[in-house]
Amino acid sequence: MKKFISAGALTLAAVVPFTLASPAYAVLDRASVTVDCNSPESGENDQGLLVGETSVITYVNCADDDYVLVDNLDSGNAIDQNQNVIGVVPVSITSDPFTVTVTEFASVTAYSDLLQNGYEVRFTVGNQVADPFGTLLATEEATLPLNGPEFNVAIATDEFTEVPLADIVGCEIMPGAHTYGTIDITVTDAGLFTFRVVDTFPEEEDLYFGIPESPIGDNFLAVYSEFNAADIESGLIGCNDDGDDWAVSQWDETNLIADELGLGDGFVETSTGYLLDDQFPWFGVNLEPGTYTLVAATWGEMSSADWTAGDTGDYTWEPVDGTITYEMWGPEGGLTIGMAEAELAETGVDSSFAVWAAIGLAGTATAMTVARRRTQRA
């Protein structure tokens, strides 16, 4: 589902809205985590939090097997339903269910000496990251459809080694077949444009407790002057698969915080409300006025046939159209698409156009030109 579209120094062309209808994927919520002590999947699990967010862990089937709780960080940020602060001294789980509220960094483990089994939930708060240069021009989704297109990357060294593309620093992808989606953009003002992935569907497993491994996984984003699936280096201007390749200093700080706490990799929080894994692409390129194509794809090998079947041979998932959500930042323009009714009344823009845009039929460059002209006349 499209979050919003706005246009300033660029316009979007031929956007088709995407609505998820599969019951196999629940809406995820960082505000609650459930740990079932009868689950065979014990061990460590991550849960990211935005600054100021609170998460409640609900333990079920834990009270009868002498499970106790500890916070390996002794952070003081985990408090149980009886108002006990969870620390390094074990606190018993006395009822079923049993809840613990977590407000910041914490590493809460439920452990049973009787069963020699444990469940650890590691909470990491996003480190607030600076906005890219310029202004936010658009937030868009590229769809990776079932039975969709794919491109192939030839082996350069071996099947386990990344292939560098067009001698661009940080621009690498694994060999093999890759399912992908595209969207065209038209740049109207020259300048530095930044592209960063902020979300995927299915969601990245490091961001939410207990969800299965995402088939999208480490993803890939590229911008082309002209895209040719038969020759993916032709027309390539910039690409990335790991955000910490581009925003190095900010990711270094983030990962240092997490490493010092023994939590593994950290996350960054954007001013636009997203929590980013360091596997999300992030890169900038200088663009002149003209038309370009953005390509979003899997970084690891994922053929269209495997994507459609939901089976790589190593693991399976419920087949569904996937999405890669990304932001585009650059020189400030002066046009917004899909304004609220109150704003439309003030500018004199025909409200029927906003309805048209809202249902996804105003994605063409022609429609956006009409909107620009109407806004200028107001």
Image: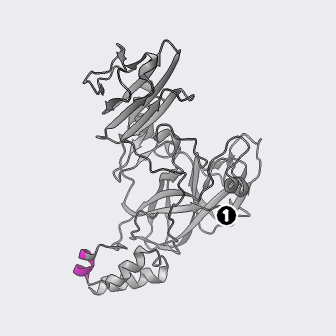
Q: Report whether residue 265 is seen.
A: no
Q: Which residue is under mark 1?
A: 148
Residue ID at (42%, 83%): 369
Residue ID at (41%, 80%): 356
Quadrant for residue 309, please give it.
bottom right
User: Where does the C terminus fall, quadrant-wise?
Assistant: bottom left
Find out whether residue 343 is within the magenta segment: yes
Q: Report whether residue 28 is seen.
A: yes
Residue range (magenta): 342-347
Percent of width and height locating residue 174? 68, 47
The front one of 357 and 332 is: 357
Quadrant for residue 143, please give it.
bottom right
Kind of residue at disc 1 = Gly
Find out whether residue 149 is within the magenta segment: no
Secondary structure, mark 1, is loop
Residue ID at (27%, 79%): 344
Assess disc 1: are there few (<14), some (14-19) or many (≥20) residues with their C-alpha within 10 Å of its C-alpha. some
Percent of width and height locating residue 297? 61, 56
The front one of 175 and 171 is: 175
Residue ID at (41%, 70%): 9
